[in-house]
Image (spheres, rainbow, N blue to C red):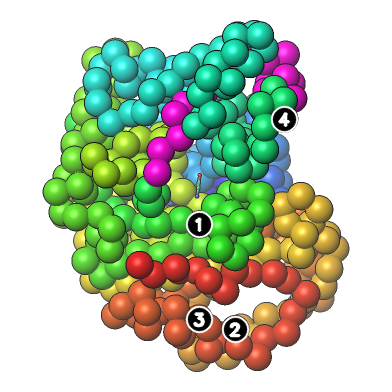
Amino acid sequence: MKVLLVGSGAREHAIAKALSRSPQEPRIFAYMSTPNPGIIRLAEGWIEGGLNDLPSLVRYAQRVRPNLVVFGPEEPLAAGAVDELEERGFSCIGPRRILARLEADKCFMREFMARYIGRGFPKWWVFENLGTLHAHLLSHPNSVLKPVGLTGGKGVRVLGRQLTNVMEAIEYARPYLEREGKILVEEKLTGEEFSLMVFTDGKKVVPMPLVQDYKYAREGDTGPMTGGMGSYSCADYLLPFVSQKDFETALGIVEETVKKLEEALGIPYRGVLYGQFIQTQSGPVVIEFNVRFGDPEAINVLSLLESDAVDVFASIAAGDLVEDVRFSHLATVCRYLVPRGYPDAPETGVLFSLPLEKLSLAGIEVYFGSVQEVNGQFSTTASRSVALLSRRATPQEAKHALDEALADYTVPLYWRRDIPRLL
Ligand code: GLY
């Protein structure tokens, strides 16, 4: 069994680790935008290539002839990598381009939800010129601006928070309106956020444990938005602020989305679908859909995956998802170590080392992100460097273990010590 993994971050390192635990001993190949030292250690072969460079990806697939192609990031999915590969006979875990619009085109996502789901979304508006946007923001100070296209999780701005006044909001929107012709505005909701990811073959939907992700760069949820600075999950697969009933409501929305996507677009959604929800007083509301595993959320859930990852992925590709996907009943806490100044002015090229043996003895797992390996040391790039994961009976114990492991660790990197902020 040969598996081609697309992507090069800590999320993809987590996918590679899950695959490498399979008793089927799959041969792993990787197509990466930057060489990931963790994936390289697990892969039989790898190549460097742009995530949007589909001819290069197709050429590598034709060389490797994988039985399965597993996607980490959204860029190749939005660019139509699955369409290109499936047309050449490759089995893919990830949606075709038309389905990937659920993440790549936020207006499409809202229109789809309004038309086919009819619940679980906030009030929303689309603006195509600055004048009408300006008038709207003056009368709706409780607004969130969302660029329509992909922004690596860093595009959302809240009026009154990152955007201190309407003029700042207009200046923020201006280049997006010029480039994309429109911008999405939503009412700002109040509540805790959570990530519900599912495996699906287009018919069956199997949920993974819920995860809470922390997107702000600095402690106390301050500073700029990032792709995610860390995350946690609980042993009962819920979160302290999400009841079983709320989980079922959220899952119902995701299940209906899978079903209605096929009805609307005529092809089944096969892969991972990730609903990002906010837990409001009146129940869970979708703030975004992503067509892939979350990063870092994948690290939490895949570290718990007890089922054979090859079976799970192969059954998705075959359109007959195994229904008893098992996860350990343990809590997880993940923290990203990032370059100082990340994300606005990251210090790149900074050398650091990791006490790999000590971390391993403490039961802390290491997932490499965007780092270069230089003579046994690591060097920072502009993105998140390394994720550390702790798995224990409770999130409190997992947090404590991570705090202990990082207590006397002096390194020129930054991490949020307040993850998780347990309620
Ligand atoms: N953790 C946020 C994301 O993966 O989009």
Q: Gap between marks 1 and 4, in whole Å?
A: 25 Å
What is the C-alpha distance between the residues marked 3 and 1?
16 Å
> Which amino acid type is shown beneath numbered disc 1?
Tyr
Above or below, 72 against 183 in this view is below
Q: Earlier in the sequence, mark 1 or mark 2?
A: 1
Q: Which one is earlier in the sequence, the residue at label 1 or at label 4?
A: 4
Residue at image mark 2: 406
The question of residue 125 being in magenta is answered with: no
Per the image, the residue denoted by label 1 is: 214
Give the alpha-carbon distance from disc 4 to disc 3, as whole Å.
39 Å
The location of residue 348, given as percent across then percent down, is 83, 60
Question: In the rendered view, would you say 254 is above or below 89?
Answer: below
Tell which tag, 1 or 2, sits nearer the viewer: 1
Q: Residue at x 39, y 70 (%)?
A: 422
Image: magenta residue range: 171-190
* Numbered mark located on residue 168 in the image: 4
Element under disc 3: helix
**Is the residue indicated by label 2 positioned so its CB lies within 8 Å of ligand 1?**
no
The residue identified by callout 3 is: 402
Estimate how packed mark 2 is, as few (under 14), some (14 to 19) or many (20 or more) residues with alpha carbons within 10 Å. some
* Picture coordinates of residue 32, whole percent (x, y): 64, 47
The answer to which of 380 and 245 lies nearer the viewer is: 245
Question: Toward the viewer: 40 or 188?
Answer: 188
Asked whether mark 3 lies closer than 8 Å to ligand 1, one says no
Per the rendering, the mark at residue 174 is none
Asked whether 134 or 37 is in front, the reply is: 134
Against 288, residue 137 (above or below) is above
On the image, the x and y values in percent for residue 409 come to: 67, 86
Where residue 307 sits, quadrant-wise, is: bottom left
